[in-house]
Amino acid sequence: MQPAPISHGAERLDLLDRRLLFFTGKGGVGKSTVAAATALLAAERGKRVLLVEVDAKGNLSALFDHAPVGFKPIEVHPGLHLLQMRTDASLREYLHLHVRVPVLGGIGPLANVLEFVANAAPGVKEILTVGKVCWEVHESLEGRADWDIVIVDAAASGHVIAQLDSPRAIRELVQVGRVRAQTEWMTELLASPEITALNVVTTPEEMPVSETIQLVERVRLELEVPLGAVVINRVLPEPLTRGDESVLAALREPAAMSVLEVEAGPGSSVVLDAVGLALSLRRSRTPHLARLRESIDLPLVNLPYLFASEHASHAVSVLADALAAELSE
């Protein structure tokens, strides 16, 4: 069996040299697993990593065989801390740090009001999420936080532009004052190609590829955030060479199958059917891979399809190894 194809355009990709990596993608393509694998790879290379989960699913902790975490970063692997975003907690932290409001936990109605504002007011959830992430990077750049890299399992592709554009949108609304100044440095941080990259995770299928192409176009038109790489997850290996295909076809002829069943046993036809299925799946995805390569001028990183129902943490480890191999090409 041949290995999956090497990524195109990913030569000497310095993805892990950035300080802030966002991962987005269509739902179901595995962006959370890819973000976790990237964080694991960074930690294994000696970086101090903060991995941020922006939604409330709590899936990332399970990928490290760890109990659910909260807003306070918890080490789930040596060198790797995980934080689950809570916008009400982010608002409380903001008020405490910047407005000098005492910690508000447990004071009843006012805390409930803040929770409502953080989660229900338009745009507030986005700016609190991005603001917390930017704050962690800002503090690490100033030497007041430990992180060498902050990796964000960001919103899905349908929502990520609104999420990342929130500092610029707020800056245009607020002309003076503390909030204006804060959105200015956040916007600069997000727009810096030396610091930030937005990476898109996809799979070699029609809808995810179409959505990825559209998202890349929209990001370039609507955001100042630099794009990093497109990670193609679940790439099937090439099971046969073109020359092997004629041999497979010959073996499936009735006369050959009769001999094969006698010589190799009654399961021979099942094995050949499985090889044929793998070949068909691989071939069906080839046009989508080709379309992606023709349409996207970003580094493309291939990660393998994991056939076995591996333990979650083992799957993350396997993908981290595959990612390391891709980035070294």
Image (cartoon, grey):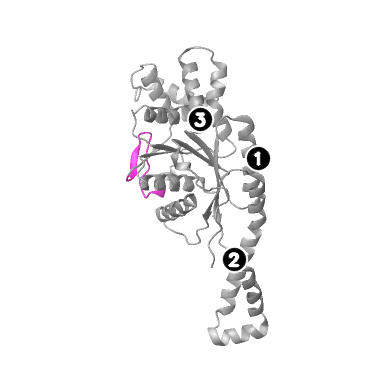
Q: Main secondary structure of the magenta part?
A: loop
**Residue beneath the point at 33% across and 41% down:** 75
Amino acid at circle 3: Ser
Q: Which mark is residue 278?
A: 2
How far separated are the C-alphas under marks 2 and 1? 29 Å
| Residue 24 position in % (x across, y down) | 54, 41
Q: Is residue 250 left or right of residue 111?
A: right
Query: How many marks can you see?
Result: 3
Question: Which of the two discs, 3 and 1, sits closer to the camera?
Answer: 3
| Residue 27 position in % (x across, y down) | 56, 45
**Residue beneath the point at 33% across and 34% down:** 146
Which residue range is magenta in the image? Answer: 63-78
Residue ID for mark 3: 192
Residue ID for mark 1: 214
**Residue beneath the point at 34% across and 22% down:** 103
Closer-to-camera residue (145/91) = 145
Viewer can see residue 265: no
3, above or below 212, in the image: below
How far separated are the C-alphas under marks 3 and 1? 23 Å
Amino acid at circle 2: Ala
Quick one: label 2, few (<14), some, or many (20+) residues within 10 Å? Answer: some
Amino acid at circle 1: Gln
